[in-house]
Image (cartoon, helix red, strand yellow):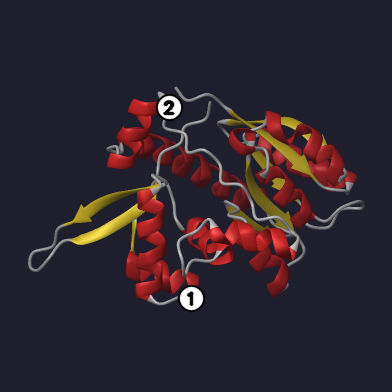
Amino acid sequence: MSAALGVLIVDDDQGARALHSRFVAETPGFFVAGTAATGRSALAQGGRVDLVLLDMRLPDISGIEVLHRLRTLGADSPDVFVISSSHDQVTVRQALAAHVVGYLVKPFTQDVLQQRLLRYASESRARSEAARALPLGQGEIDRLLSTGTLAVPPRTPAPAEAGAATVAHARLPKGLAEVTLDRVIAALDPVRPVSASDLAAACGISRATARRYLDHLEASGQIALSHSYGRRGRPRVLYRLAVAPPE
């Protein structure tokens, strides 16, 4: 039987925290690991839970800022499910771009939240099982042989200063840009492989450009390749992020 998932409930309204805590506590497979009324309190607890139910409107820092800071926790970064009365396009797009696992607009019923949580638990288990079953790519095998780990060394982010940024960009092959590379990596997934055409559409770049970035990522061992064989014609090449299990 799978272990219950710990949930941190973040909302500046005391009544909402109490109500959502009850909803979570009465959902099979989940328990309330903590509550927070501010963004800073949420960040202090975020590395110790599986899932954060995050309101976007907080008294100290915005929910979007909390979301981005949680992502810097690396392997300790929890999944985030937004529960908020904010549903303007800017806020929703920013949250989705940060790969939240759900976005539920207030007010909502207990049944609706429980259905979303149970769906999340099912999809989370499926992703974990799929990741364990994925075959290793050549880059992953080479990295395992040379370093003893599948983890990809983090890239050094481009410095904010213009002069230093030019030096950082120079480390990439000619014609590649850091900002586009980051967009390509963000559009890739360690479980669900995509084609170059799908990736190009998701990033708003041409297929030829997408291929150049994918070739660079393959050469550096950051992605793995697989093939999809149809009934006729050449097989499609599919790409996914290299598996990097938490330490």
Q: Is residue 122 left or right of residue 18?
A: left
**Residue at (78% x, 39% y) in the render:** 43
Q: Of 226 and 129, which appears nearest the observer?
A: 226
Q: Could you tell me residue 154's position as x and y percent?
A: 56, 42
Q: Nearer the viewer, mark 1 or mark 2?
A: 2
Q: Position of residue 69 (x, y in %)?
A: 73, 46
Which residue bears the numbered disc 2? Answer: 149
* Left or right of 118 on screen, residue 223: left
Circles 1, 2 touching at the beta carbon (< 8 Å): no
Left or right of 203 in this view: 219: left
Residue nearer the viewer, 223 or 32: 223
Quadrant position of the N terminus in the picture = top left
Q: Determine the secondary structure under disc 2.
A: loop
Residue type marked 1: Gly
Point 57% across, 51% down: residue: 101
| CA separation in Å, label 1 and label 2 | 33 Å
Quarter-of-image position of residue 167? bottom right
Between disc 1 and disc 2, whose residue precedes?
2
The answer to which image quadrant residue 7 occupies is top right
The answer to whether residue 142 is above or below residue 69 is above
Question: In the image, what residue occupies the spot 52% across and 45% down?
Answer: 120
Instruction: Give the amino acid at mark 2.
Output: Thr
**Which label is found at residue 109?**
none
Q: Position of residue 184 (x, y in %)?
A: 48, 62
Element marked by disc 1: loop
Nearest to the observer: residue 160 or residue 59:
160
Q: Which residue is mark 1?
A: 204
- The answer to whether residue 228 is above or below residue 220 is below
